[in-house]
Image (cartoon, rainbow, N blue to C red):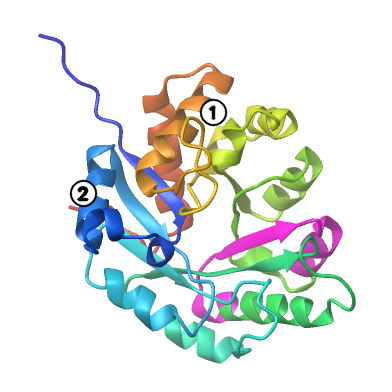
Amino acid sequence: MAVAVVIMLVDSHCHLDLIDLAPYQGDISQLLTQAHEAGVESMLCVSIDLESYPRMLGLVEGRRDVFVSVGVHPNDRDRHEPSPEALAELAAHPQNVAIGETGLDYFREDGDMRWQQERFRCHIRAAKLAGKPLIIHTREAREDTIRILKEEGADEVGGVLHCFTESWEMAQAGMALGFYVSFSGIVTFKNADELRDVARQVPLDRMLIETDSPYLAPVPHRGKPNEPKYVGKVCELIAELRGIEPEELARITRDNFYRLFAAATPPA
């Protein structure tokens, strides 16, 4: 009898609190059960604002298969601006493993971007206070993102360039500062040839995979709500690009996750 190969995946970036739970009768445990049945061992539920953070934390608090981060997304101009000390205090929660997501997004915003840059600097300082890595969102802000990471000494804590869609040159610049590069369902899209070229080049020991659910569902689920259970499709596509088995890439990215997010421990 053939022995089934068990793939142990980690979804390194999702927003469980934003997923519509109606198909699961409002019960997040059903959604997580389906993720586990698809081979997903753990998930990192990422914060985008402090107003919804208590609800997000309450949704998953006490679970050993879900970790959290705390931060304010760069796109939300009118959000409360936290201090580094306040963020670091929130990051002391035992399930918290990171600061973010944070960064720069010049795609949706224009004009004077100093407010966004100052928020970014605040998060980097919080990460250094907390001793935890950063989750970086960057879009059409390559030079400023790398410049501020350097100026603030972000290499002291490292982190991940999440949902990466930028150039190979930016990936190299980020990795030179100790950052990992994470690929989402975008890498499976038909028009993502340049991104697939980056995925072929990033060293395997610096790679993560994610869903960014409920957004950016991978092919063949594109256009539908995304969930952690679909992270395996990202794994399969990149494994094909690299000429290795999905099981091997799953193991590598899983190990990378626990190496980067040192406060996270695999579920027993």
Q: In front: 219, or 138?
A: 219
Vertical order, 186 against 32 (above or below) = above
Task: State the extent of the magenta-drawn residues as a range.
Answer: 127-150
Q: Would residue 47 be found to the left or right of residue 248 on screen?
A: right
Q: Where is residue 143 in the image (x, y as percent from the top left)?
A: 85, 58
Q: Tell me what residue is drawn at x 69 percent, y 67 percent.
A: 103
The residue pinned by badge 1 equals 238
Q: Nearer the viewer, mark 1 or mark 2?
A: 2
Q: In this view, does 95 lie to the left or right of 111?
A: left
Place of residue 235 in the rendered image (x, y in percent of width and height, measured from the top left): 46, 32
Residue 114 lies left or right of residue 236; in this view the side is right
Q: Considering only vertical position in the picture, is 73 above or below 24?
A: below
Label 2 sits on residue: 33
Q: Is residue 16 left or right of residue 7?
A: right
**Residue at 43% in and 65% down:** 18
Q: In the rendered view of the protein, which quadrant contains the N terminus?
A: top left
Outermost residue, top direction?
1
